[in-house]
């Protein structure tokens, strides 16, 4: 069985996909991972560009209509063969060289309790308005959920496939993985990761869009946490 799968949600990232995939292959050469590109309703041929690379271990899934980042990640994880999954954004702003920081702790875990390794961006290469909006949203979320992380919006995450698929699925769930994993009794590790500027294309989301959906998401996740106090059961000996 494949040990590691890399899942990349992408929408209209034809200008970034080839470089990003080649960087992933280089960064994770020791693990020879399965790489899954989830083309989330692109109209610019993103999936075709990915297939044309002919890279080993590459699979391309396509949503005929855009379902959003959480839907793309969920499709990728469902299709993945690895027991450990890593995700990163398809815009190239998450450096693939950071991926070993995510999967190495999961492979090294001997307790069976580590469910998620979440990246936290430092020296973000985004516009001032985007950084300020993110800072406000992260502060509000941390106050409401007590999830212990300053940056749940970072696309760089590593997790156990079985733990992820046991979580309640909803749109935008990818932004709440630390809180959801802790809700199910898993341990969460945080690692600082670098960030870089977008090289091609443009963002698929505006600050206003994130803010509007974030309020309802936050209330929903807080409700889920209050409704479940039961910890993950210990594995049978």
Image (tube, rainbow, N blue to C red):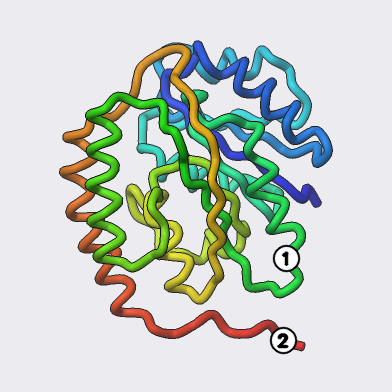
- Indicate which label's residue lies in the foreground, 2 or 1: 1
| Residue that lies at the very extreme toward the front in this rendered image | 123
Query: Which residue carries the number 1 mark?
Result: 109
CA separation in Å, label 2 and label 1:
17 Å
How many residues crowd around disc 1 within 10 Å: few (fewer than 14), some, or many (20 or more)?
few
Are the residues tagged 2 and 1 within 8 Å (C-beta)? Answer: no
Tell me which residue sits at (75%, 39%) in the image: 33
x then y, percent, for residue 202? 35, 17
Q: Is residue 107 above or below residue 44?
A: below
Q: Is residue 157 above or below residue 223?
A: above
**Is residue 178 shown left or right of residue 138?**
right
Q: Give the quarter of the figure containing the C terminus.
A: bottom right
From the top left corner, tell me how far across and down residue 167 is, in percent: 46, 64
Residue plotted at (63% across, 84% down): 234
Q: Secondary structure at mark 1?
A: loop
Measuring from the top left, give residue 180's x and y in whole percent.
42, 65
Q: Secondary structure at mark 2?
A: loop
- Image quadrant of residue 128? top left
Outermost residue to the right: 30
Q: Nearer the viewer, residue 118 or 184?
A: 118
When the figure is inspected, residue 106 is found, relative to residue 146, above or below; the finding is above
Upstream in the sequence, badge 2 or badge 1? 1
Q: Residues within 10 Å of mark 2 (few under 14, many from 20)?
A: few
**Looking at the rendering, which quadrant does residue 148 occupy?**
bottom left
* Residue under the image location 40 percent in, 13 percent down: 201
Instruction: Look at 47% across and 28% down and name the residue there.
Output: 10
In this view, the residue in front, 16 or 138, is: 138
Residue 122 or 156: which is nearer the viewer?
A: 122
Q: Tell me, for residue 236, which label it has, or none.
A: 2
């Amino acid at each position: 069985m494949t040990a590691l799968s890399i899942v990349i949600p992408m929408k209209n990232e034809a200008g970034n996909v080839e470089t990003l995939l080649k960087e992933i292959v280089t960064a994770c050469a020791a693990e020879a991972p399965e790489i899954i590109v989830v083309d989330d309703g692109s109209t610019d041929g993103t999936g075709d560009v990915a297939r044309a690379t002919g890279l080993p271990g590459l699979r391309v899934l396509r949503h005929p209509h855009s379902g959003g980042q959480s839907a793309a990640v969920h499709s990728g994880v469902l299709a993945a063969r690895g027991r450990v999954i890593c995700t990163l954004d398809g815009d190239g702003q998450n450096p693939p060289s950071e991926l070993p920081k995510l999967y190495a702790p999961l492979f090294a875990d001997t307790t069976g309790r580590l469910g998620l390794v979440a990246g936290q961006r430092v020296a973000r290469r985004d516009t001032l308005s985007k950084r300020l909006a993110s800072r406000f949203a992260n502060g509000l979320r941390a106050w409401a959920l007590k999830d212990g992380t300053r940056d749940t919006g970072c696309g760089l995450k590593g997790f156990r496939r079985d733990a992820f698929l046991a979580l309640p699925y909803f749109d935008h769930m990818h932004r709440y993985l630390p809180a959801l994993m802790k809700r199910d009794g898993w341990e969460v590790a945080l690692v600082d990761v670098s960030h870089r500027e977008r090289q091609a294309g443009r963002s698929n989301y505006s600050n206003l869009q994130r803010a509007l959906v974030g309020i309802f998401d936050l209330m929903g996740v807080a409700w889920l946490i209050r409704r479940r106090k039961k910890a993950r059961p210990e594995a049978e000996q």
